[in-house]
Structure formats: structure tokens, C-alpha cells
């Protein structure tokens, strides 16, 4: 498409088309090459790309440029919402709240952006409080399915079953309970609140049984509740319906096997992923199988799987933690009898405090006190601390 130098309309259309097609990086690159002064529409077109890329620096720069042009809160609600979305998705919640509080008119997008940002921060209770403030603000900006999904994410983080049930009831009253994305969020929230039965009831009422997210989420719910048999039955039902599984579904199945120590079943599933369905296992799949082997006391099998993991995957904290914990309990032929521990001392392994502690314990159990102390000294030198775990569910 031909253009003349300084044609802001051409640039705006170009940037908007790239952003809408999901080519966020290209949209930002085009914005940086503009030879014309951007207008409000140009800025509103590139800001969603900034949000997708989590580019807070450019988002702030665009906001500052708009303010210098006299665009204060309320001057352009669409642009205000776009800036708010960038702040929320980049975790700049103070900036988001400051902008939100200064907006004279807030629509459902404004409220949802704030709920979404708070739900994914370390203050999910604030997301629930924001949602309640939205309801009390009146019917000018009623919540939509995106709002419900965002606050359900916060409920899943807090484990508040009462709040989850209240949101479920509200969604049904508003006619949003049948939305697939809302149903999936409800399944996840109920599962994390310890209510696998309610999670399955929501799944059973979903109109679309072809959605892989729904299948994976309800299988995960059964796995968390220790219902491995039900998870495997759901997998069989999914196959009978002609739905082809993906890596997320297999991860849920392996997680279920891991919880009850079904090592043979886990190994069969891992093998079937590539052999039958052509799906390359992820690092998380290997972690679950390692854990299943360890729980069943198959320490030799865990060591063999660890050695056979593709090198391109690397060994992250979860893999190392699963391997070291069960090698420690096995004592023989585990990490204590390998030179693997030296990688913890020389810093080539990037692991968390829990994994370092397990490695030290494994060496101590094998009588390798000097090596165990060396691992502990490395922890202290690198200022690596073991974080205490905690779990809670609100009634």
C-alpha cells in the first residue's frame, strides 16, 4: 500500500492490523519507525501490543506522551483503558490503581483490567474486593465473562470455597454459567478449593465437550483429590468421544498417577505420548513420572528416566527436586553415588533451596558428610534459602 511521508493514517492502519493479527512485536517495531506524530488512535492501536509483550517501559512512555499532549484521565476513555490494561498486565498495580481512581467513567473493561491484574498479583483478596466494589457501583458496568474468569482465578488462589460458590450462583443468575471459559474457571476454582465433586458437576453441565481445556482441567481436579481412577476413566471417555488429547491432558493424567504411585501406568502414558499420538513430552511430564517412580519405591527406574531425559530439555528445579527427594529416600544408586552433586557446588545447577536441602540430605544419608556440608556451604554463599511450604483452604 503506497503512502506519503508522514502519513499518520497509513501508519495507524499498519500498526493496528499487526496488533490485531497477534504480531505484537512487529506492531511495536513499526511504531518505533513512524515518521509521523502519532495521534490517539495510533497510541490506542499499539498499546495492546505492549500489553501482550509485557512492555511496561514503552507503555509508560506512551502514557507520558499522551499526558504531555493534554490527554488527562477522561479525555479518551479507549486510550485510558488501553494504558490501564498495560499497567495491569505488567504488574504495575500502583500505576494502574492511580489511573483507575482518576477515571471519571469506568466501563466493564476498566473494572476487569483491575480485577485481572490484582488476581494475578500477590493480593488475590484485593481482586475479590475490587469485584465487590464493581457490583456495588451499580449496573452501569455489569461484569462479563472475562470479569468472572478473572475473579475466579483469585478465588482459586485463596481457596475460598464460599466465595467460589457465590460466584457460581452469580454467574448462573447473569446467564454466564453456560459459557465455556467461565465453566473451565469454575472447575479450576472448585478443584483448588478441594471440591472435586462440584468441579465434575460443572464439567458435566458444559455444552461443549470438545474443549481440551475442560477435559484437562477436570482430570487435574480428580488428580488433586487423589481420584486417579476417575481421571483415567475421564480420559477413556474423552477418547470414545473422538477428542484427541494434547500435552496438557497427558500432564493431568501423569499428575494423577504420581499422586497414587501408579508407576507402570505413568510409564505407559509417557511412552504412548510420542509413540501413539506424536506428542513430545515436556519437562513437566518427566517430572511427574520421576515422582511416580519415587513414590512407588522404583528408585532405579527414576535414575534411569533421569539419565535418559533429552539433554535439550535441561533439568529445572522441579525435575531436580523430584529426582533428589526420592534418590535421598532410596539411598542406593541415587544421586549420592554419582558425581552429580558436584554440579550443585560449582553452580552449574540452578535449583531452589528445597532441592539443595534434599541433595545435602541424600549425601548425609549415604555418610558423605563432607560433601553434604559443601552443598550447604554453597547454599549459604549463594544466599539460597529453603522456603517453607503452606497450603490452606477456606470453608
Image (cartoon, grey):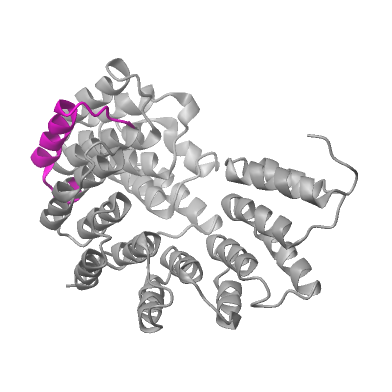
Q: Which residues are magenta?
A: 223-246
Q: Is residue 388 left or right of residue 26?
A: left
Where in the figure is residue 282, as x and y percent of width and height?
Answer: 38, 32
Could you say which is closer to the camera, residue 185 or residue 134?
Answer: 134
Q: Residue at horizontal 26%, vertical 21%?
A: 271
Could you say which is closer to the camera, residue 274 or residue 77?
Answer: 77
**Image-quadrant location for residue 161:** bottom left
Q: Main secondary structure of the magenta part?
A: helix
Observer able to see residue 241: yes
Q: Number of numbered discs present?
A: 0
Residue 232 magenta: yes
Is residue 239 shown above or below 65? above
Query: Could you tell me which quadrant the N terminus lies in?
Result: top right
Where in the figure is residue 251, as x and y percent of width and height?
Answer: 29, 37
Is residue 314 shown above or below 114? above
**Image-quadrant location for residue 185:** bottom left
Q: Is residue 157 left or right of residue 191?
A: right
Where in the figure is residue 310, as x and y percent of width and height?
Answer: 43, 23
Query: Could you tell me which quadrant the C terminus lies in?
Result: bottom left
Residue 112 magenta: no
Q: Residue at horizontal 79%, vertical 57%?
A: 38
Where in the figure is residue 244, as x and y percent of width and height?
Answer: 27, 27
Q: Residue at horizontal 68%, vertical 53%?
A: 46
Q: Residue at horizontal 47%, vertical 48%?
A: 374
Q: Residue furthest right?
A: 5
Q: Is residue 344 left or right of residue 318?
A: right
Observer able to see residue 367: no
Q: Residue furthest top?
A: 275
Is residue 172 shown above or below 259? below
Amino acid at each position: 500500500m503506497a503512502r506519503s511521508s508522514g502519513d499518520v493514517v497509513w501508519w495507524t492502519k499498519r500498526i493496528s492490523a499487526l496488533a490485531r493479527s497477534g504480531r505484537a512485536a512487529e506492531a511495536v517495531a513499526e511504531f518505533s519507525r513512524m515518521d509521523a506524530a502519532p495521534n490517539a488512535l495510533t497510541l490506542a492501536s499499539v498499546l495492546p501490543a505492549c500489553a501482550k509483550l509485557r512492555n511496561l517501559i514503552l507503555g509508560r512512555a506512551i502514557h507520558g506522551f499522551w499526558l504531555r499532549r493534554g490527554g488527562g484521565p477522561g479525555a479518551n476513555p479507549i486510550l485510558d483503558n488501553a494504558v490501564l490494561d498495560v499497567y495491569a498486565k505488567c504488574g504495575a498495580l500502583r500505576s494502574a490503581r492511580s489511573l483507575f481512581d482518576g477515571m471519571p467513567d469506568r466501563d466493564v473493561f476498566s473494572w476487569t483490567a483491575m480485577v485481572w491484574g490484582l488476581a494475578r498479583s500477590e493480593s488475590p483478596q484485593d481482586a475479590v474486593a475490587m469485584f465487590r466494589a464493581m457490583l456495588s457501583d451499580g449496573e452501569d458496568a455489569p461484569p462479563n465473562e472475562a470479569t468472572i474468569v478473572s475473579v475466579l482465578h483469585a478465588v482459586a488462589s485463596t481457596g475460598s470455597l464460599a466465595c467460589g460458590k457465590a460466584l457460581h450462583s452469580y454467574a448462573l443468575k447473569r446467564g454466564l454459567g453456560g459459557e465455556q471459559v467461565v465453566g473451565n474457571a469454575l472447575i479450576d476454582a472448585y478443584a483448588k478449593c478441594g471440591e472435586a465433586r462440584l468441579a465434575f458437576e460443572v464439567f458435566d453441565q458444559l455444552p461443549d465437550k470438545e474443549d481440551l481445556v475442560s477435559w484437562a482441567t477436570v482430570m487435574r481436579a480428580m488428580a488433586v483429590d487423589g481420584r486417579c481412577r476417575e481421571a483415567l476413566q475421564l480420559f477413556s471417555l474423552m477418547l470414545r468421544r473422538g477428542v484427541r488429547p494434547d500435552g496438557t491432558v497427558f500432564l493431568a493424567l501423569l499428575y494423577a498417577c504420581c499422586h497414587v504411585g501408579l508407576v507402570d501406568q505413568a510409564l505407559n502414558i509417557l511412552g504412548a505420548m510420542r509413540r501413539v499420538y506424536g506428542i513430545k513430552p515436556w519437562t513437566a511430564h518427566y517430572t511427574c513420572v520421576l515422582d511416580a517412580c519415587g513414590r512407588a519405591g522404583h528408585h532405579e527406574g527414576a535414575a534411569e528416566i533421569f539419565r535418559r531425559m533429552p539433554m535439550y530439555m535441561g533439568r529445572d528445579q522441579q525435575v531436580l527436586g523430584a529426582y533428589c527427594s526420592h534418590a535421598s529416600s532410596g539411598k542406593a544408586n541415587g544421586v549420592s553415588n554419582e558425581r552429580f552433586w558436584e554440579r550443585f557446588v560449582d553452580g552449574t545447577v540452578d535449583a531452589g533451596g528445597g532441592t539443595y536441602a534434599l541433595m545435602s540430605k541424600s549425601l548425609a544419608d549415604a555418610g558423605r558428610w563432607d560433601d553434604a556440608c559443601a552443598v550447604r556451604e554453597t547454599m549459604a554463599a549463594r544466599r539460597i534459602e529453603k522456603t517453607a511450604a503452606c497450603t490452606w483452604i477456606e470453608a
